Amino acid sequence: MQTISGQCSCGKIAYHYPAPALQIVACHCGLCRRMTGAALSSYVVVKEAELAFTQGQELLKSYTVTSRTQRHFCTDCGTPLYNSNHETYAGLSMLYLGTVNQHESLAPRMDIYCENKLSWLETSDSCRHFEQMPRKS
Ligand SMILES: [Zn+2]
Ligand SMILES: [Zn+2]
């Protein structure tokens, strides 16, 4: 069974997740673009209750992006580690894929908010494309 681990760029914060990812998404929405500074944002979705910080948790700070969205980052190096949204995605942590050690084997399974995708950005045809967030089944 695949487990997940990761760290920020300075290495002071590290986390471990004991189970496979619930979902892996590439988000093209404008909010994620601004708050990550990247053309698209890739997230590994895990259960918040099972995500354990193995070091540096005291360096973690939360920034309230919107009334629902919080971004959690390292106060030393500024790396964003995960997002949370306690209304829409209660109980979930959206780990930034770039901080995950196993990023090579965790390809996004779907692209969301494709209507906001930058026109010059090419996405894999193997991804499932959604104009917005698909409803939970
Ligand atoms: Zn750091
Ligand atoms: Zn987004």
Image (cartoon, grey):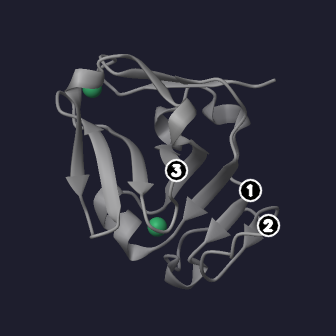
Label 2 beta carbon less than 8 Å to ligand 2: no
Residue shown at 21% from the left, 30% from the top:
77
Secondary structure of residue under mark 2: loop
Residue shown at 70% from the left, 29% from the top:
19
Give the answer, above or below, for where 101 lies relative to 22: above
The picture quadrant where one finds residue 129 is bottom right
Give the distance between the C-alpha atoms of the residues marked 2 and 1, in whole angstroms.
Answer: 11 Å
Name the image quarter holding the C terminus: bottom right
- The percent coordinates of residue 33 (x first, y second) are 38, 65
- Position of residue 29 in the picture relative to residue 76 (left or right): right
Secondary structure of residue under mark 1: loop
- Residue position marked by numbered label 2 in the rendering: 125
Give the answer, above or below, for where 94 lies relative to 122: above
Nearer to us: label 2 or label 3: 3
Rendered image: mark on residue 109: 1
Name the image quarter holding the N terminus: top right
Nearer to us: label 2 or label 1: 1
Secondary structure of residue under mark 3: loop
